[in-house]
Amino acid sequence: MDTAAWQRCIDFHGHSCPGLAIGFKAVKALEQQMGPVCENDEDLVCVTENDACGVDAIQVLTGCSLGKGNLLYRERGKMAFSFFNRTTGHNLRMVFKLPVSRKDVGREELQQMILHAASDELFQFGQPGFSIPEKARIFDSLTCEQCGENAVEHLIRLHEGKKICLDCFEGYSRGW
């Protein structure tokens, strides 16, 4: 095990835990499946389906981040990660499969099991069910005519002739 990389993840996250171990092992599995990860390479994109501890390890070890636009959150509540390499065209989706019931082992024991298990024991591998997200774009900001705050133009709504941000906008639905 790469203890220096694990320690970098702990330092960033603030503590060690089974969730962080999942993200750590996801990156190690990614390297086995798609090759070495270059932390400064914006061509690697991660779409995470959860906002749990493991995402911190993915950020540390891959360099993917929200700010660079190559870490995207797709809320599904699954411990699943899809990786895309814009240069090679390779992609991979991995879904964590718990090797034991959480009721049967303690937190530290579970963490150690995850850290020392083989990738195929921890993850189901497949292809993402969606295409690689487009590269991050820079948008102009517009001022909400209700609250006065700026928001990016693609998230402004037009309501009664006024530009309104999502926080001020009251959507219309007929219950469908």
Image (cartoon, grey):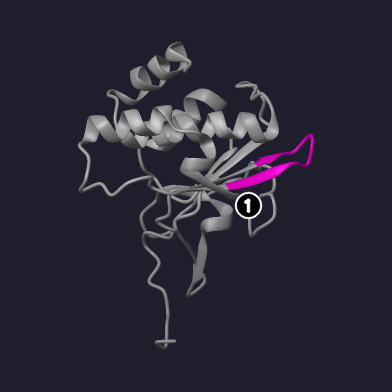
As drawn, is 39 to the left or to the right of 74? right
Judging from the image, what secondary structure is the residue with disc 1 in? strand
Residue 161 image offset from top left, x and y in percent: 52, 71
Residue 117 lies, in percent from the top left, at 44, 32
Q: Is residue 174 visible in this depiction of the protein?
A: yes
Image height of 156 relative to 5, above or below: below
Q: Residue at x 36, y 42 (%)?
A: 52
- The furthest residue to the right: 88
Residue at 58% over, 56% down: 154
Was residue 29 drawn as part of the magenta stretch in this picture? no
Q: Which residues are magenta?
A: 84-93
Amino acid type at circle 1 is Gly
User: Where residue 174 sits in the image (x, y, percent)?
Assistant: 42, 88
**In this figure, which residue is indicated by the disc labeled 1?**
126
Where does residue 176 sit, x and y in percent of width and height?
Answer: 44, 87
**Camera-nearest residue between 115 and 26:** 115
Query: Closest to the observer: 140 or 83?
Result: 83
- Residue 135 placement: quadrant: top right
Q: Is residue 100 above or below residue 163?
A: above
| Residue count near mark 1 (Cα–Cα under 10 Å), binned few <14, some 14–19, many ≥20 | few
Queried whether the magenta region covers residue 92, the answer comes back as: yes
Picture residue at 66% right of the left edge, 35% below the top: 33
Q: Quadrant of residue 78?
A: bottom left
